[in-house]
Amino acid sequence: MRYLEDLKDGDNVVCHYLCKRKDIMRTKSGKNYMSMILSDKTGTMSAKAWTLNKDIHSFDAGDFIKIEATVVTFGDDLQLNVRKIRKSMEGEYLSGDYIPVTDKDVNVIYALVLDFINSLENPHLKELLTNIFVNNHEIKTSFLHKSAAKHMHHSYMGGLCEHILSVTQICDFLAPRYKFVNRDILIAAALLHDIGKIFELSDFPENDYTDIGQLLGHIYIGSEFIAHEISKIEGFPPALKNLLQHCILSHHGKHEYGSPILPKTIEAFILNYADMTDAHTKMFEDALENGPVGSNWAGYNRTLLRDIRKSNF
């Protein structure tokens, strides 16, 4: 297996990859070519088949394919120039090579999530979280196996529960350090802030936006899901419901980042920064981990808009 992250300019590749996207495009001269996004568990890479002949066999996006290609540099990125393609046959590839997975133990993560739920004093919030994370087997399974994003951060199987636990731990650290913080609301909101991603993103190996995810987004989906679950709990205080939903709706912090409302409670404010801290720090971690060997500089990160350096001296 030649993992995408290990490929270098000039490499010749004969290997199997997952085709995440396939489009027939046209050059300025009017010649048709095939544009693809190929992936394995280490990431994705653009691929082009410039000549559509008998060596380019039929396949669809979502298929595993065997390619013969050369790695070239295009702009600032590597790209595969593909000469031959055929659909992979069962037994020619291992699915584990194509699905990135958290290096954390999801069973340990789940146990820590349960500890947080059991630490809540408010009976309504404890019942809500128990219904979602314990009694709902489908939600529990998705929570432990979904990614937290398509590309940005924690974009691998188990990334969602890893991210949610980290955000909750940050919130738990900050809660006793400031006046007026309702810890139960903050912890419940942290555990639920990205619950909508269960419905926003499809399962691996696709890990792409679902139709409802594209149309509504995980913030709105999560808020509506929580409201629906709350409606099943007799006597759940309306004011508590509003405060919890407010945290979910405002957790991206700004309108331009997708939140329909700005954080207006101290819990929502802390949640926003805890979420941003974990997501951005994870981007730093990934950049440093994937940076060039032997260099303190990991290169320019387009999302963080900066060059990133290891703290070696």
Image (spheres, rainbow, N blue to C red):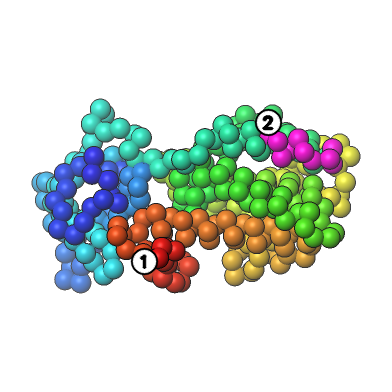
Name the residue at 59% across, 37% down: 109
Name the residue at 41% across, 58% down: 288
Which span of residues is magenta-colored? 114-123
User: Residue 44 versus residue 280: which sits nearer the camera?
Assistant: 280
Name the residue at 64% across, 57% down: 274
**Occupied quadrant, residue 79:** bottom left
The residue wearing badge 2 is: 134
User: How far from the left and from the top, in percent, is residue 240?
Assistant: 84, 50
User: How far from the left and from the top, in percent, is residue 183?
Assistant: 79, 50
The residue wearing badge 1 is: 297
User: How far from the left and from the top, in percent, is residue 14?
Assistant: 16, 44
Give yes or no for residue 117 being in the magenta stretch. Answer: yes
Q: Is residue 99 left or right of residue 184?
A: left
Residue with the most extreme front position: 313
Q: Nearer the viewer, mark 1 or mark 2?
A: 1
Residue 216 visible in the picture: no
Give yes or no for residue 179 being in the magenta stretch. Answer: no
Sequence order check, earlier mark of 1 and 2: 2
Secondary structure at badge 1 equals strand
User: Residue 23 versus residue 194: which sits nearer the camera?
Assistant: 194
**Occupied quadrant, residue 92:** top left
Residue 187 visible in the picture: yes
Screen quadrant of the N terminus = top left
Q: Is residue 32 left or right of residue 122?
A: left
Secondary structure at badge 2 equals helix
Screen quadrant of the C terminus = bottom left
Overall secondary structure of the magenta section: helix
